[in-house]
């Protein structure tokens, strides 16, 4: 049976019409499945019994389950979420002092193949549906009920903008049905230029986190295969267009790899690349990934020196807290084996011109 989660109120209204019910029942049903997170039709007390029976005969509410979880000492919890077809993704629950965030997957595996990332090592199986993305959020709130989840970042398994239609639909559902502020939603990308431009036109104005990880094309080509398709000049032009369209500053993610992109010269080149475009650089010291290319974490002194160069150029800098390392949940450690299968090599449209 098809799941109900993933359908907007307008889609549910059409469903009510098809079932011979008044349209206002759609609003009631949406409140039950999205805001109250109800998974039992019998508990939907303001819906008539005949409607509840009809729905139960035709639709499941949700299908994803947490198969196992691993918690780290800092409070982060990584969940392996099993989908209806048996494939799996990972989702990370991240409590902070003043907010609670979840890191959502958008694909089973990833086709991009960044050389530093665990997810791409497992290959690519398929895109997630909008409902499967939203189910992760609802499931995390069910499993961690003590504090309301306030933020969601599309930074888990997969490249969100290679699944742009479903990611945009999921963001609309989180904003409109689950009622998470768009200002608290962030979508990450390695720089899929058509996706950035489509996101700018999506009437969402969510945060955009651009994973640069290099100050020039020579280095970036070695780290991120999609850079050969969309080089930095095109990526930065799309990022500037996104800011003009939405009024939202772009965050620039920069993974520091010892001896590859962490020199003072790289920092100065990065500052020049960004120029006068507003937005903070978020530095991420590398987390070693078993089986990946043998990168190393830069020393604390090297990180401080890189940061100092950027700040001297007037660029705001943050440094990502290394949350979830004990649970293999930090950035770049979402296990590739969760994809459940390996896939053919990268699509030519992603990896080459």
Image (cartoon, helix red, strand yellow):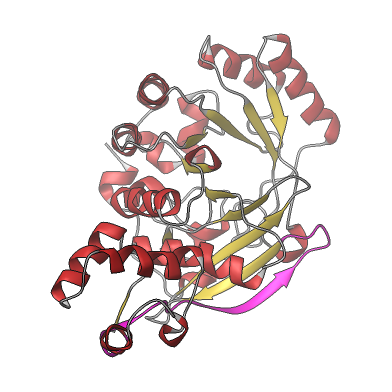
Please give left or right for residue 60 compared with residue 221 in the image: left
126 relative to 310, above or below: below
Total labels drawn: 0
Quadrant in which the N terminus is drawn:
bottom left
Residue 333, percent across and down? Answer: 63, 58
Residue 249, percent across and down? Answer: 51, 24
Please tell me which residue is depicted at 63% across the width and 21% down the height of the picture: 266
Along the line of sight, the residue nearer the viewer: 178 or 133:
178
Residue 48, quarter of picture: bottom left
Quadrant in which the C terminus is drawn:
top left
Residue 124 appears in the rendering: no
Please tell me which residue is depicted at 65% across the width and 60% down the height of the picture: 93
Along the line of sight, the residue nearer the viewer: 123 or 3:
3
Residue 321 appears in the rendering: yes
Please give left or right for residue 203 compared with residue 243 in the image: left
Please tell me which residue is depicted at 45% across the width and 55% down the height of the picture: 158
Residue 60, quarter of picture: bottom left
Please give left or right for residue 273 compared with residue 169 in the image: right
Q: Which residues are magenta?
A: 56-76
Instruction: Find out whether residue 271 is within the magenta segment.
Output: no
Please tell me which residue is depicted at 36% across the width and 25% down the height of the picture: 238
136 relative to 100, above or below: below
Residue 79, percent across and down? Answer: 61, 70
């Amino acid at each position: 049976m098809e799941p109900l989660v993933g359908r907007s109120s307008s889609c549910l209204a059409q469903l009510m019409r098809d079932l011979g019910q008044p349209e206002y029942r759609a609003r009631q049903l949406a409140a039950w499945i999205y805001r109250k997170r109800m998974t039992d039709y019998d508990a939907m007390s303001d819906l008539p019994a005949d409607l509840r029976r009809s729905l139960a005969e035709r639709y499941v509410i949700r299908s994803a389950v947490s198969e196992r979880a691993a918690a780290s000492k800092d409070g982060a919890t990584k969940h392996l979420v099993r989908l209806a077809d048996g494939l799996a993704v990972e989702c990370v629950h991240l409590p902070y002092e003043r907010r609670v965030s979840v890191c959502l997957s958008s694909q089973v595996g990833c086709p991009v193949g960044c050389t530093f990332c665990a997810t791409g090592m497992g290959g690519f199986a398929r895109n997630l549906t909008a409902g499967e993305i939203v189910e992760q959020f609802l499931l995390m709130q069910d499993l961690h009920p003590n504090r309301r989840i306030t933020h969601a970042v599309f930074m888990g398994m997969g490249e969100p903008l290679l699944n742009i239609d479903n990611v945009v639909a999921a963001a609309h559902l989180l904003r409109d049905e689950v009622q998470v502020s768009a200002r608290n939603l962030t979508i990450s990308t390695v720089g899929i230029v058509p996706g950035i431009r489509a996101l700018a036109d999506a009437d969402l104005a969510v945060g955009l986190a651009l994973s640069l990880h290099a100050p020039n094309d020579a280095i970036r080509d070695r780290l991120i295969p999609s850079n050969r398709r969309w080089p930095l000049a095109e990526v930065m032009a799309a990022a500037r267009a996104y800011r003009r369209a939405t009024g939202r500053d772009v965050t620039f993610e920069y993974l520091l790899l010892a001896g590859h992109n962490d020199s003072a010269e790289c920092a100065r080149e990065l500052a020049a690349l960004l120029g006068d475009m507003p937005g903070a650089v978020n530095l991420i010291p590398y987390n070693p990934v078993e089986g990946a290319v043998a990168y190393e974490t830069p020393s604390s002194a090297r990180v401080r020196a890189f940061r100092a160069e950027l700040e001297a150029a007037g660029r705001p800098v943050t440094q990502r807290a290394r949350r979830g390392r004990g649970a293999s949940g930090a950035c770049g450690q979402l296990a590739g084996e969760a994809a459940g299968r390996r896939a053919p090599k990268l699509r030519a449209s992603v990896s080459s011109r």
